[in-house]
Each structure stands twice: as C-alpha cells, then as structure tokens.
Amino acid sequence: MLPAKVKILFVVKANAYGHGAAPLAKEAERLRLKGEPSADFFGVSSVEEGAALRKAKIKTPILILGSLYPFESFLEAARLNLIPTVASLEGARQLSAAGLKIKKRLAAHLKIDTGMGRVGVSHKNAFEVVDFLSKSRGAALTGIYTHFSSADSDSGYTRLQIERFNKALKNNGLKNGKILIHASNSAAVLNHPEANYEMVRVGGVLYGLWPGFKPLLSFKARIVFIKKMEKGASVSYGRTFRARKPLRIATVCVGYADGAPRAESNKGEVLVEGRRCKIIGTVTMDMLMIDVTGVSGARVGSEVVLIGEEGKEQISASEAAGFSGTISYETLCAISQRVPRVYHW
C-alpha cells in the first residue's frame, strides 16, 4: 500500500500489543535482512522496552515514543543506542547535557503537538526547540513527528493536524530529506495517504486489527473440568448466574490474571468445537465457566478459543473487546506474561 521510499516503523510497545515484542522484532528483522519489505525502525514506549529488544540482539534502529523521565535516562538510552523523543525545550537541554557529558552528539526526534494534547512541543512554539537542537554540540535533531488523535473517526480534525504539522515544518525550514519526517499511525495510513511523509508508524494494521488485514494472534485455553448442573444451582463468586434449567458446565483454565476480563462475566462468548458458548458466572482469577450444554463433543482437554477461529466461527479481538466494553488494543495488551506464546512462522 505504501510507496517504496516510505519507511516503516513497527510499533512493538506494550510487548507488541500482547503478541511478544522480541520474537516479532526478530522475525521482522530476519525478513528485512533477506531483502523482503519489513520494519526499518521499531517503536517502544520506554528505555526499559528498548533495553529488552537490545538484550534480544535486535540491531534495527529503535525510537522511544514516550517522553523520557527522569532525564538521566538519556544516558542509558545512549548506551543502548536508542533514539529518544524530545518534547520540550527542557528535554532538549537535558539531552544536550547528556551528550556533552559523554562527548557525543545524541540523536533525537522532536515531537510536535498538533492537537493530540498529550506530549509534544506546541506546533506554534517549535522554533525555539528546533533552533536549540540545530546549534547544540551534545544533541542532533534527526527526526520530527506528530501524532493524530482521531484519524479513524474525524477526517476534518486530522486534516487540521496535518495542516498544523506542515506549517510547523515550513516555519522551521524542515523539508523531506533533511531529517526524517513522520506522522501517520495505522488509521492515517488507511485514510490519509497525504500524511505518509518519509515514514509511517504502524501497529494495528500489522497485527491484523483492521478490516482487510489478517489477525496474527489467537488466544486459547483448555477445558479442565465438566459437570452437570441442576436447575436453580449457582455458579462462581457472588452467585451471579443461576441455572433456569439443567445444564452442562465446563471450567476453563483461563481467568482475569491471564487476560480474560472480569467484565466478560455473564456476557462473553468463546468457541468450543466450532460452536459459540456463553461465559456464565463471574470470571475468576484463574478460571471461568462456560455453558457447553449444546456441544456434545466438549470434554476435558477440549480447546477453547477466546480470540481466533474454530471451524466456521470466529471471535475477533474487536468482538472480544466488545464483550467487556473496551477496544481490541486494550484486550490484547491485557493478555498477561504468564500465558505462553507459541509462534508459527
């Protein structure tokens, strides 16, 4: 979908949205080294996340998308060859001081706030920071970017953000080729190709969280216990579910400590033997219960799909998120570290 000249920053923060940052980064790096289209940069949220990738022997450039604090973190970022984000004049000064301390010009990307309202120097006041970095002996401005707040839902506001960003670039004499310019997230790549610039920062489309893209992840567990339930009997904490008729109930070895939200209690669905089954009762820390009355093949050891496909049925990350009133990104990030990840390349 992208012109060949546009670089890709693969966003692998939050453990690659729950998928596992190091294994995915290794695979992306392997593909790039083979000459296939892949990630030119990786994006993380902190020095700690960048350090984990470096420990996994990832050599690709890594941009820290979050604002660093304490400022002493600039020294650790430099040691690990991570590129920090600068979002204020004070941040630029601290980065420069760190560079002077180790007698090295430290590369950084400047973040411009064009309307996200989270982190970044105002698009109206960027000159002072750009000017400082251009003259600094301890820091070097190698990139500049902004972030869109609603590229998936408000085209008018996104166009306004693009206009503000372009104006900031023009006012500061910044052009394509001089430094690396980037703005688009997944939504903007799909809806605003005019904002591709020299690099895009994508996560959601690469994880398959957008229509037309294949999901990378399935989330599965196993049935560990089955019993018959009499009419009037209750299930789980608080007795929030009581049977109106005899049922066949299965206990599944997954709970909210694994990433099956408690908010799915008496609301969520899973797949067993290609059939949809209701979550009944309160989801507990390590287990949840489902109604398998209509699934004759369900047994101890049967696979239970919380996210993914089974037969002709599918529960997407987006649908799973809907059961608990959230978004697919949060649902995937909530899959805990104690859940084993199995990769099929």
Image (cartoon, helix red, strand yellow):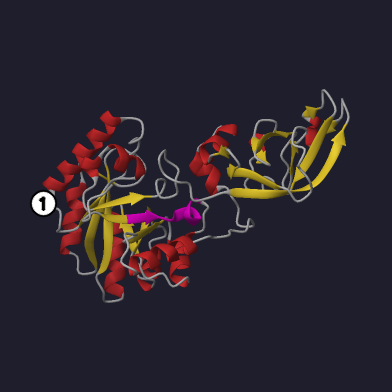
Decide if residue 254 is on the left or right side of residue 60.
Answer: right
Answer with the quarter of the image where residue 331 lies.
Answer: top right
**Which residue corresponds to the image point at 26% horizontal and 72% vertical from the top-left?**
100
Residue 248 x %, y %: 81, 35
Q: Is residue 14 magenta?
A: yes
Mark 1 closeness class: few <14, some 14–19, many ≥20 residues within 10 Å: few
Q: Residue furthest bottom?
A: 103
Answer with the quarter of the image where residue 135 lies.
Answer: bottom left
Which residue matches tag 1?
A: 173
**Which residue corresponds to the image point at 22% horizontal and 55% vertical from the top-left?**
4
Q: Nearer the viewer, residue 204 or 15?
A: 204
Dot 1: element: loop
Residue 222 visible to an observer of this rendering: yes
Against 289, residue 244 (above or below) is above
Answer with the quarter of the image where residue 129 lies.
Answer: bottom left
Residue 158 x %, y %: 27, 35
**Which residue corresponds to the image point at 22% horizontal and 61% vertical from the top-left?**
142
Decide if residue 254 is on the left or right side of residue 345.
Answer: right
Instruction: Give the magenta-colored segment's residue range.
Output: 9-17
Name which residue type carries label 1: Gly
Decide if residue 270 is on the left or right side of residue 177.
Answer: right
Residue 75 x %, y %: 37, 69
Against 59, residue 324 (above or below) is above
Residue 128 x %, y %: 18, 51
